[in-house]
Amino acid sequence: MTDLVHHLGGVHRYLVHVLRERLTTPPDPSGLMLPEIPDDPDALTDWFARGAREPAELLHELGPDTPVWTWSHEQTSGFWLRMQLIEPAVHRWDAESATAAPGPLDPDVASDAVTRTIEVMAPARRAWRQAPPGTAETYRFRRTDGPQSWTVVFSGDDVRTVPGPTSPVDVEAAGTPDDLAPFLRGRVPPAALHVKGDTGLLTHWFTLVPPV
């Protein structure tokens, strides 16, 4: 739990640096001085709360269209706004998992987490970790409590999404967004989903999209 608080608090302060300075190029880590992380649990809670407030205030001030650096092709404050809705929700799930069964994710946030994982994080993770080339592996992730589905093909270095819910796939994994989002983040096993097709490809997903 302490590691999780340290991680999120560091992300908050890194993001504040990007937003406050309106950076349009990657920040120089050597110039980013994070305040000392306290050991006392109460002080650590206060440290975390202060760090969480600042990016929220800056994002409210900037709105979604201010040009700033991101690690994605989308170079606006709106990228960070969207990611900073998803990431704390997923890490809240992590925190609750440390001691008990986690509560459900908001369906809309979880659905957007699936979309962002496939469309944004998968290509980025493949580049960061030099993942092996795809050989036309085709996946569909289908929402069981609504009409959404996500079909994705790995072809060489490309991650390509396919519109429509009926194209042929090698494997289909179905569940609520609250099932699909944690699976794609490596939090729950394939057994948590309803699977049709080559079940081994669900494990192979994490070779094609390495965790970070």
Image: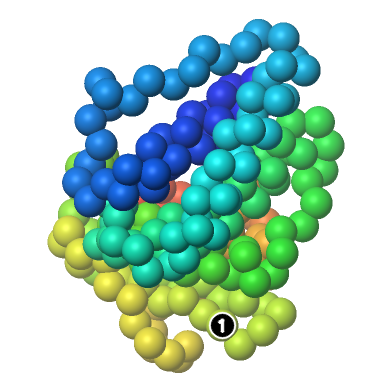
> The C terminus appears in which quarter of the rendering?
top left
In which quadrant of the rendered view does residue 75 lie?
Answer: bottom left
Q: Is residue 63 above or below residue 191?
A: below
Q: Whole-percent x and y of residue 60?
A: 54, 59
Q: How is the image coloured?
A: rainbow
- What residue lies at 56% left-to-right and 24% top-to-bottom? 6
| Amino acid marked by disc 1 | Gln
Q: Residue at x 70, y 45 (%)?
A: 93
**Residue 90 drawn above or below residue 107:** above
Q: Which residue is mark 1?
A: 148
Assign the N terminus to one quadrant of the image: top right
In the depicted view, which residue is nearer to us: 21 or 41? 21
Relative to 149, is 137 above or below? above
Q: Position of residue 204 (x, y in %)?
A: 39, 51
Secondary structure beneath dot 1 equals loop
Residue found at x 39% / y 59%: 77
Q: Position of residue 20 (x, y in %)?
A: 39, 44
Residue at the extreme right? 100
Residue 17 point in image, percent of width and height: 38, 37
- Residue 104 sits in which quadrant? bottom right
